[in-house]
Image (spheres, rainbow, N blue to C red):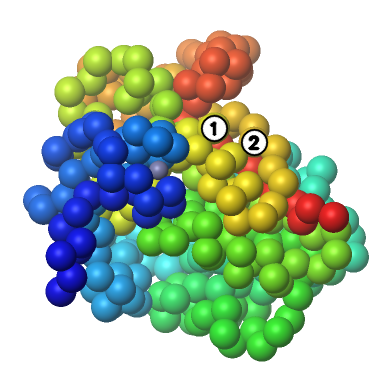
């Protein structure tokens, strides 16, 4: 073990100057969250070893998510069903970047629910998913899914979708460079990640939210600026857009009860105008929960 193993440092810019953001991390009593004073990236330290990480995503991730999010993760079928609305939320954002003759790859395709939606707008889809249970389920539904990028030889794609994966990676810059090498000329990488400036964390005072939000599987949590920085460091150009996944009911339940799961609770009398003006206000101030990025090759 080298002397540097315990030095707290930013894995993107290498700076050891940091500020402690949270010493409480869900599912991990040994780690804490820091903000790099040089590049402002928010990162977890220490993180799992590569061996622990491989074992985790092959066999433990679904149980971990079921513990956090409840029903919807207990079986591949239930997961596929419960994520239909999430697929519908994403579609209007991605459609301007899709053409009928595109080949599309999704990294971390889970049960294939998003590929199922996307397949109507492009010519071919393929997913990469390390979990055998999810991969088998997707295959049963006729959605081409492989275990790792290595199974795709040197195939290249017009569009690569990578949703809620980048924050899990120990080397996001290196991984994006690998994806860039798989882009055809004129190709695009579509990315979504949580926004560290989420209003629930940055503005509202909800004692239970931080300890829920910071988790052992999120090695980096991005802002508009740090996501841009990481993508540009990988050699791509990028546009970042604000997006809001969770609704006003969810936020009210966090305030009243200090817990997740409130999505949709008051939709019987909240109008769609109320919901859309609330999310538009969050988006306008970049206090939204989600960042959507479109990365393209520089040439
Ligand atoms: Zn840094």
- Measuring from the top left, give residue 197's x and y in whole percent: 42, 26
- Measuring from the top left, give residue 220's x and y in whole percent: 38, 47
Left or right: where 162 falls relative to 238: left
Q: Which residue is located at x 85 percent, y 55 percent?
A: 299
- The image quarter in which residue 46 lies: bottom left
Q: Which residue is located at x 24 percent, y 65 percent?
A: 48
Asked if 37 appears above or below 171 in the picture, the reply is above
Q: Is residue 53 visible?
A: yes
Mark 2 in CB contact with mark 1 (< 8 angstroms): yes
Left or right: where 232 falls relative to 48: right
Work out how far the residue at label 2 is from the one at label 1, CA to CA, in angstroms. Answer: 7 Å
Q: Earlier in the sequence, mark 2 or mark 1?
A: 1
- Measuring from the top left, give residue 73's x and y in whole percent: 35, 59
Q: Is residue 119 visible?
A: no
Question: Does the closest atom of ligand 1 sit within 8 Å of the Cβ of label 1?
Answer: no
Determine which residue is flagged by label 1.
224
- The image quarter in which residue 65 lies: bottom left
Q: Write down which quadrant ligand 1 falls in.
A: top left
What element does badge 2 sit on? Answer: strand
User: Could you classify mark 2 by the number of other residues whose Cα lies within 10 Å: few (under 14), some (14-19), or many (20 or more)?
Assistant: some
Q: Which part of the image, by quadrant, shows the N terminus?
A: bottom left
User: Residue most toward the front?
Assistant: 3
- Measuring from the top left, give residue 52's x and y in whole percent: 24, 73
User: Could you classify mark 1 by the number of other residues whose Cα lies within 10 Å: few (under 14), some (14-19), or many (20 or more)?
Assistant: some
What element does badge 1 sit on? Answer: helix
**Which of the pair 7/23 is nearer the observer?**
7
- How many numbered circles are shown? 2
Left or right: where 279 falls relative to 95: left
Determine which residue is flagged by label 2.
240
């Amino acid at each position: 073990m080298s002397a540097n193993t315990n030095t707290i440092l930013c894995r993107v810019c290498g700076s050891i100057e940091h500020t402690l953001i949270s010493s409480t991390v869900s599912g991990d009593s040994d780690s804490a969250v820091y903000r790099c004073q040089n590049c402002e990236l928010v990162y977890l330290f220490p993180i799992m070893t590569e061996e622990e990480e491989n074992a985790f995503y092959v066999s433990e991730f679904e149980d971990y998510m079921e513990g956090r999010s409840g029903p919807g993760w207990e079986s591949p079928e239930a997961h596929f069903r419960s994520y239909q609305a999430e697929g519908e939320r994403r579609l209007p954002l991605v459609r301007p970047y899709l053409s009928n003759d595109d080949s599309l790859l999704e990294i971390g395709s889970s049960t294939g629910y998003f590929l199922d939606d996307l397949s109507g707008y492009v010519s071919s889809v393929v997913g990469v998913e390390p979990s055998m249970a999810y991969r088998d389920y997707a295959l049963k539904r006729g959605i081409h899914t492989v275990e790792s990028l290595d199974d795709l030889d040197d195939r290249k794609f017009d569009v690569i979708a990578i949703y809620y994966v980048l924050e899990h990676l120990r080397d996001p810059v290196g991984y994006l460079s690998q994806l860039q090498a798989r882009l055809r000329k004129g190709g695009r990488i579509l990315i979504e990640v949580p926004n560290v400036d989420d209003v629930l964390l940055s503005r509202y005072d909800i004692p239970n939210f931080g300890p829920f939000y910071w988790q052992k599987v999120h090695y980096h949590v991005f802002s508009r600026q740090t996501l841009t920085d990481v993508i540009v460091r990988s050699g791509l150009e990028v546009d970042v857009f604000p997006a809001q996944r969770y609704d006003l009911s969810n936020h009210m339940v966090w305030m009243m009860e200090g817990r997740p799961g409130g999505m949709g609770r008051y939709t019987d009398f909240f109008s769609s105008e109320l919901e859309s003006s609330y999310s538009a206000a969050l988006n306008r101030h970049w206090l939204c929960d989600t960042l959507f990025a479109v990365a393209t090759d520089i040439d």
